[in-house]
Amino acid sequence: MKQRVISGVFIALITVVAAYFGGVILDTVLAFIGIWGSYEFTRVRKKDFDVILFAVMVVTVGLLVVFNGKAMPILLLEMLVLLTIAVFDEKENFDDVAATFLMSALLGYALYFMRHFQHIDKFLFGYVLIISYLTDVFAFQVGIKFGKHKLNPRVSPKKTIEGSVGGWFFGCAISLAWAAIFKFFGMSPTLFVVASLFLPLVSEIGDLVFSLIKRHYGVKDFSNLIPGHGGILDRMDSHIFCMVLFGVLMSLFV
């Protein structure tokens, strides 16, 4: 537990510094997340580490972050490359390349939106981060004290309906208050009402999705990079889904 707390404080400090100062610091953090996250996902399967799939995923994620305006041709090219690999490399099959394609798009878009939100306003970036963070913290605390009914034991045996509701409530209320304090960052208040209602739910779904991936591959954590926490993807699961959905909502409301 002590190790987990120390690691958590260290991660929080890096996050705050990167979010506040942006620039090279943020880009370095995002680059590390993209590279190591690609490594974790490539190696999580119970087979030899595939350098080719790793390279394709890293390049795709990097291109999506830097050239997101060209996202469609980037993803189409990756799809063609991955399908070609499946045809000529007998070690890979359709499931392998399809999973790589899906995770490349998800991770690439999430990192792009992190960079984009911070460029708009560092406290807007903080708004999206605290939703997933607070939802997770309060879901755990409420679940420990009041949880009786399992949420989805097939995917995550410890999560409860009570914890999920508590995480949603506090994530929604505190994030909406955060947005109001900063006068909704000069944007439509409706955007933040909708986001504060739905992002905590998406945060919890993201957590469950990554738990499903780990169960599918028969692993407890994506890696042991962060003592007491697991890997980058173990810590980024909720953030990834929140960043992507908020990016979608901004495209609709702004």
Image (cartoon, rainbow, N blue to C red):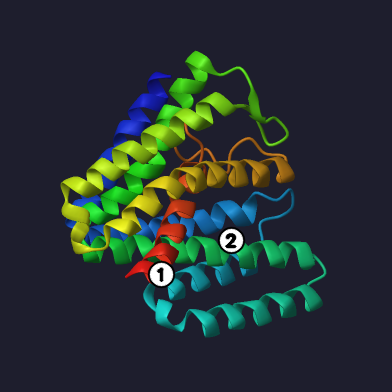
Mark 1 Cα within 10 Å, few/some/many (few <14, many 20+)? few
Q: Which mark is residue 148?
A: none
Which residue is depicted at the point 65% across and 49% down? 44
Q: Nearer the viewer, residue 127 or 116?
A: 127
Q: Is residue 39 above or below residue 87?
A: above
Q: Is residue 2 above or below residue 40?
A: above
Q: Which mark is residue 252?
A: 1
Q: Position of residue 158 (x, y in %)?
A: 61, 25
Q: Nearer the viewer, residue 135 or 218?
A: 135
Q: Which amino acid lies under the numbered mark 1 shown in the image of this protein?
A: Leu
- Find numbered disc 1 in the image and state the secondary structure of the residue it sits on: helix
Q: Position of residue 97 (x, y in %)?
A: 70, 67
Residue 217's quadrant in the figure? top right
Q: Is residue 204 above or below residue 57?
A: above
Q: Is residue 227 visible?
A: no
Which residue is depicted at the point 39% across and 53% down? 194
- Nearer to us of marks 2 and 1 is 1
Q: Which amino acid lies under the numbered mark 2 shown in the image of this protein?
A: Met
Q: Is residue 219 visible?
A: yes
Question: What is the residue that sits farthest to the right in this orientation?
Answer: 90
Q: Is residue 128 left or right of residue 231?
A: left
Q: Which residue is mark 2?
A: 103
Mark 2 Cα within 10 Å, few/some/many (few <14, many 20+)? some
